[in-house]
Amino acid sequence: MSLAVTSTPLARRFEALPIAIFLVLALAPLAASFGAETYLLGLFTRVMIYGIAALALDFICGYGGLVSFGHAAFVGIGAYTAGIFGAHGITDMAITLPVALLVSALFAWLTGTVCLRTKSVYFIMITLAFGQMIYFVAGSLSPYGGDDGLTLKLRSTLFGFPILQYDRALYYAVLAFLLVSYLLLRGIVASRFGRVFRGARDNPTRMATIGYDVFRYQRIAYVIAGSLGGLSGFLLANATEFVSPSFMSWQRSGELIIMVLFGGIGTLHGAIVGAAAFLVLEDMLGGITENWKLIFGPMLVLIVLFARGGLLGLAQSVWERLRRG
Amino acid sequence: MAEPVPNPVLRIENLRKNFGGLVVTDGVSMTIGEGELHAVIGPNGAGKTTLINQISGTLAPSAGTIYLNGADVTALPPNKRAELGLARSFQITSVLPRFSALENVALAVQARSGSSYRFIGCADKENALNDAAMAALTEVSLDRRADILAAHLSHGEKRALELAIALAMQPKLLLLDEPMAGTGPEESERLIVVLQRLKGRFAMMLVEHDMNAVFALADRISVLTYGRILASGQPAAVRADPAVMTAYLGEELE
Ligand SMILES: Nc1ncnc2c1ncn2[C@@H]1O[C@H](COP(=O)(O)OP(=O)(O)OP(=O)(O)O)[C@@H](O)[C@H]1O
Ligand SMILES: [Mg+2]
């Protein structure tokens, strides 16, 4: 991570921004009803779902300095839990969601125990390796479609009620999960635990010599982030009514990192902005040309080079310049 | 060589550390008694920092035993030793750059007051933590700079901050690795006064090149050369030791 000295004031000064983001997300379906409703609802549902995964990644990356290149693994685990249970006719999220969270938490605990013994580049490589491992495992699950993945016959139900059946209901359910995830992580970052976790990013040796078992704090944070990744995947399976190994390819993990950088690392709400910017741009450029990645790539590089705080950082410096006149 | 202390806070027996073929700690045994300020001096590369690293647990010795208040801590990680009352400063300043001076110290207080596995509530608004942290900052005259990010403190202030962090841990043994290094004469003078005031409250090991400081503060001095203790005892005796004089004279001629 960059060594630039930044603390949290960015987040504090832009307090209005998270509120605005959630207001826009809450009202978006109304606007969408004026045209292209299915498309817009679908796009923003995906934005929020990836937003949850990106939030979780920003938590460990931006606050803990743990750059995971395997975060999509958790998304995949959450999605496959919904998919595999669905294939056996179990769709009630009172069962499937806790299992999805638990399995991703367990995977985070086990892999975290190994990954967190390493640092910096090695951490990136080993999280990537675990991500690839689970990717190949999913591809080899021939009863569940192997490389092709499998279709969900039914979206999750709650106590037998098909509450996610309508796109709007799904949308607001996802929004509620995003809001809860955001508030949860914000609370954790400011808490005693969060302060220790942030301290460990700055100087793990110092934290150890004042009495903290850095590894244990980092592993708990990793489990929290992994569970939220699982939540994201669980919702993604419901939104797309489909799961496949591609959900957890290393490209997906890379995209999550890009979303975090894109929005502004270490701010939490920046991750949501990043997810929105990424997916909307991808859709727009994808509509113009098949080679959209040729445009998208350089744009990314420019943003990361010239707006070190991502889009939020860019917005903030423009705002400050305007105010000073 | 070193006269035994009845109930030493720190006891090291036959400590040995080698990096490949290079022996950096060569059978060191020493004790530090309650309230004692024990200075360790020696030329560059003598193995002083390596010794401190082994005592604090950031480096594993190749052989030998370390006792803290009678308990064998040789296999314990640094955080466990900190829990047992061991604090240290680093030769190369080691603080949390993105936290304010106050929060640097508050984190040390937090480590000793209740669980840190708390996921709700604002840690930086806990008065009990902040008050104790402020008290430690006041002891090193850094209270006026409490809200400054540690990265923006001057070198001397960072050194003082390290001391405040250590004090906030309410240590039983404090290891100081060249606290005066890189500070100006005035700041050194101030630091000597602070250490003089702290002396006796807990045991201290002071590694320092500044001989003014060493002779002003030390109860006992050990001289380390090539990883071995060359001499150890009262300051006057060590100063008069011919072996020490040649070792230091030899260094100055280079
Ligand atoms: N990790 C390491 N690997 C290999 N050699 C090391 C390592 N750490 C220290 N050394 C070597 O061990 C010797 C002692 O180093 P140490 O830092 O303990 O000396 P010192 O007495 O603290 O010196 P100074 O007064 O310059 O701080 C030096 O020769 C150093 O190069
Ligand atoms: Mg040294």
Image (tube, rainbow, N blue to C red):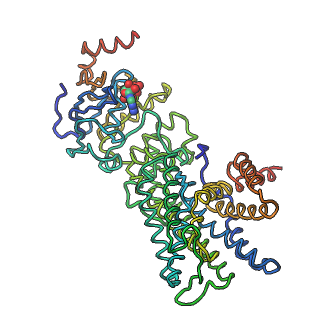
Is residue B213 visible in this depiction of the protein? no
Q: Is residue B247 above or below residue A168?
A: above
How many marks do you count on the picture?
A: 0
Left/right placement of residue B33 relative to residue A225 reads left
- Examine the image and state in which quarter residue B145 appears: top right
Q: Residue furthest bottom?
A: A160
User: Can you give x and y, in whole percent of width and height, for residue A80 in the image?
Assistant: 53, 72
Q: Residue furthest front?
A: A142
- Residue appearing at x 23%, y 32% in the figure: B30
Q: Is residue B227 above or below residue A140?
A: above
Instruction: Tell which of A74 and B74 is nearer to you.
Output: A74
Instruction: Tell which of B155 and A85 is nearer to you.
Output: A85
Q: Quadrant of the N terminus of chain B?
A: top left
Q: Is residue B76 above or below residue A15?
A: above
User: Can you give x and y, in whole percent of width and height, for residue B185 in the image?
Assistant: 48, 24
Q: Is residue A243 above or below residue B154?
A: below
- Examine the image and state in which quarter residue A63 appears: bottom right
- Examine the image and state in which quarter residue B217 appears: top left
User: Can you give x and y, in whole percent of width and height, for residue A229 in the image?
Assistant: 54, 66
- Residue appearing at x 37%, y 54% in the figure: B112
Left/right placement of residue B12 relative to residue B78 reads left
- Residue appearing at x 44%, y 40% in the figure: B162
Q: Residue furthest top?
A: B253
Q: Quadrant of the C terminus of chain B?
A: top left
Left/right placement of residue A323 relative to residue B44 reads right
Report the image quarter containing ligand 2.
Answer: top left
Is residue A218 visible in this depiction of the protein? yes
